Image (cartoon, helix red, strand yellow):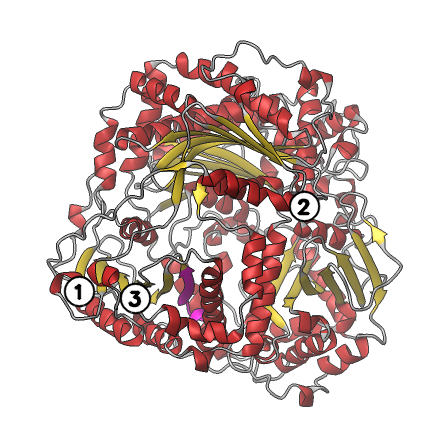
Amino acid sequence: SRMALAILLLAIGVSSIRNGLSDQAIKRRRSEMIKGSNDPREYKTFVMDNGLPVVLIRDETSFTSSASINVDVGSFMDPTSIPGVAHFLEHMLFLGSDKYPEEGSFDKMLGEHGGYSNAYTASENTNYFFSVDTAVFEDAVDMFAHMFTSPLLSMNATNREANAINSEHSKNLNNDGWRFEQVQRDVAQPGHPYNRFETGNTDTLMKDVDASHDALLQLFHGHYCVPNMHLTVLSSLPLSNTEELARKSFADVRQTCDMTGIKDVGVGEVMAKINEGDYLQPYNDSILGHYVMIRSLKDVNEMTFHWQTPPQGGAWKEKNADYVGSLLAQEGVGSLTALLRDEKSLIGGLSAGPGENFGMFGTFEVSVDLTDEGKTKVHYVAGAIMNYISLLRGDDAVASWRYDELKTNSKLRFDWKEKESPEDYTSDVASQMQHYPTSHVLFADYDYDEFNAEGIKEFLEILHPSNLVVFHLAQEFISETNEWHKDKYYGVEYSTSSMKGQYSDGFYKAYEGEHQRMFPDLKLPQPSEYIVTDTNTREISPEATPADQLTAAGADAPAKLIQNDYQKGTENQRVVAWWLQDTQFLVPKAHVIVKLMTPTFFEDVKTKMAAQLFAAMASDSLNAETDAATSAGYSYNVGSTTNGLAVSVSGFSQHLNKFLSLVLDKLNDPSKLFKKARFSAITTAAGKNLANSLLQEPYKRIGSFLSGAIESPSHDPVELSDAISSLEFDDILAFKDQHLSDVAMEILVFGDASLDDARAIVKSAAESLPSSASSESLLKSLPAASSKKIGRFVQGSKTSFRSPPTDDSNPNSCTLDYWQYGKPKNDTDRLYLSVLSAVIHGPAYDQLRTKEQLGYIVSASGDRRGKVMGLRVLIESLKPASYLHDRIKNFMDTMADPMIEKMTKDDFDGVVETLNSQLSEAPQGPSDVLNTAYAEISSREYRFSRRKEELEALKSMTLSGFKRFYKKLRQGAQISMQLDPTASDAAKVDDETAALDTSDSHSSDASEEDVKAFEVQDAAAFPITLKDWRKDQDEYDMEPPSPLPACDLC
């Protein structure tokens, strides 16, 4: 039977994983790494004397260095009785070592030198990484290495850090993503490692503190050793230097795991059974063939078809699952998405492909976002999916030419992908070392090396109804049940029922293709006309800025005007066009951004939402038309701005003009493109998204409330939702004629485009889209960059706002305290804020999060709104918001103020040197060049030499000047934004935290009695309170746009 075949394949897959890498694979670890043809970095691999595998990366242009260690054990190793231990150990390793016992010293050092650290715990691995200025990289590597050779793992820290784990868990309690994943684990068979609670909380970790501490020791000593570890190091230093550094720093990592004298509390007990051949599959007949309803908190309607598969790690060169997923997820004519979304409007979107990929099993998932109409026609949606799988089992579907298209597109992505950040890259490479021979660590995810028709057909046989679990996440269901279970960790309700009779008959018939007559529009895709075969770049135009002029520190390529209708006095056309040919990276791709700007800003909420819906409708309507191109690496975006529309197109130069013409031509006549049924679905989805935004975690919501107090105009989600409800389909059809008939056009052509190419693109865009102005103001000049007005608050004033959170089921409070500095006088002031951000975050995190254990989310950073600067400190916690405000005040008074006051010249110069390194760093890819230039164009400032000017400003920075800057900021206006679910602040805090010192205030500002406090009991009234207060405040003057530079190429 097909299920027998699936189980056989599963057993074969697990056997290959258990046996590990073969001798041949080990030899391949020593072979040269395959890297992208446009990757300028150098690589070296070696194995240290203690057996630790290492990948070294040299990136000469990066000022930041990074290292990552991947440990090949994760939460599957947790003892059955103590869930969350692997995650707990991840936290504990950051809390000091024998050589560096001071908690927070690592993060403090990183923060002061432009870096940071992080880690994550997954089911089968735990990954640690950091980044920092190369000037202090050697010290940072030494601190990092001692985390793995001599961590303290003290009992005292164990007690405190368990509270941090609990705060992290409480942050996730109301997150539907975490809740959904936990139910997927809950329904797995008991005893399987997948049937776990991964993150832990105080209930699991503090039930028996001694046992938890013993488990930390057992996991570290028994599994954190060379056979389970991989190291990646990236720096601009020569490879010989980083090799010497790695060998010296990590020489003491244990060659073997030794648990002598360590108590056995069950770490790895379940995985030991796996290795004996038990519990290979997480799901058995008790859940396979079942429908699982999961009660969501947000208004979502997501259905996931979840097949249990053999592990796919052994098929990484074939990518059979990826092949199937690509066909199910395509959006062109005849696709599932074209039928279910574009024609029937039953779904908002569809994704398909491999899900989990563990050593013992894998999953394959098809997920759909159901519309309200789709919710009533689940059988039809499911039948279409199963029928398309039947279609894929035909001979025409499994074809080498289809595989070759995937192979070509994937290789192009690999060869021309841009650099990731150093810390993301080292983390990714170290984790990949766990799975692939070193020669393919970079390339394995992109490698379509072996077309295996039989393998694809065998995989399709596994996607059988009897091997399926359907998970449905929603607030309400068409067919409710009284038999609900409640997960004990998240409190999420779920119900399981057999699909026999209800679904399975239809599933089986559709799977066998018997329902083909019901879905005659489902077709396989045709060959793409957008496959890229030419990656040669254009000749560099003589007018472009040569690469050798961009080698100096802080040098950025300026965009150049090639058309300025304001200068040449055209009658009505108002086109301003910029061109920037990439002469540094020579990537065969180009980017075109077209902005249509009206003379007035969309401050009326109804017009604002009409613009957003017009853009959403346009983007949605183009999906099927552009699928062949987007599958080949092209992309487009249609979005609304504060006073118009922005269209961007990017991709390989070979077909870019054809793709751009396709997009622009379709947008020119919305009446032929937009469908009324899709309007209903899109507006409903937009309304739900706005309603769901009210249920975001407090630390995410509070920023919008602060913006409501500081910025004008602002609109809360309820206002926006009401505006959507008032709009009709005809309003969207009429939007172009009503609001885009009086416009100026601004265009940027960037990348692999000669001057002639750019001029042709500008001409095409101006002919395809409106580009004529009629109003006097727009005929005279481009509109301002923004209509946002920033409040100018009385220096020394204190205002607090307190409200319940908009999600009354969330137990967390959140406080965000803000100090306004005002507008900077010059670049030096702006850079002083960067210094403050660098020196304050580490101590704030260490004190408020690590030592006081107030909550998992703690941050301190500079705040920029237009040209207005400030400082913000945020805490999310289970403690009352007013108490969090007191702790922030205490931190600023007793720690931050003295720290700045006692700051030495050497300390200050060290931070300034890091800023110098950051500003001197060359662009790391075309996107950096594009983003830098476009930011100047969009802001209407046109300071294309900004970085050079800021580097010059660094030379005038002084310690005394920084202290004056900080004093002025602390004396500025203060706003405290507080979200608190408690009815009053009578809630008690534990004695230990309450006893913390709040004396010795160093702040010179007024007492807390001078605070003007606003408190509302109804969260819905909070935005109104903020707006009413904001109306009475002064405002900073709007910045006029800078004049356009001379158009020498016009």
Structural distance between the alpha carbons of marks 3 and 1: 13 Å
Q: Between tags 3 and 1, which lies in front?
A: 3
Crowding at dot 1, Cα within 10 Å, few <14 / some 14-19 / many 20+, comes out as some
Is residue 700 visible in the rendered image? The answer is: no
Q: Quadrant of residue 776?
A: bottom left
Q: Quadrant of residue 538?
A: bottom left
Relative to 507, is 422 on the left or the right? left
What amino acid is found at the position of numbered circle 2 in the picture? Asp
The x and y percentages for residue 245 are: 41, 29
| Tag of residue 807 | 2
| Tag of residue 565 | 1
Disc nearer the start of the sequence (3/1): 1
Q: Between tags 2 and 3, which lies in front?
A: 3
What amino acid is found at the position of numbered circle 3 in the picture? Val
In what element is the residue under mark 2? Answer: loop
In what element is the residue under mark 1? Answer: helix
Depicted 771 relative to depicted 893: above or below: below
Depicted 700 relative to depicted 748: above or below: above
Which residue is disc 3 drawn over?
A: 743
Q: Residue furthest front?
A: 1032
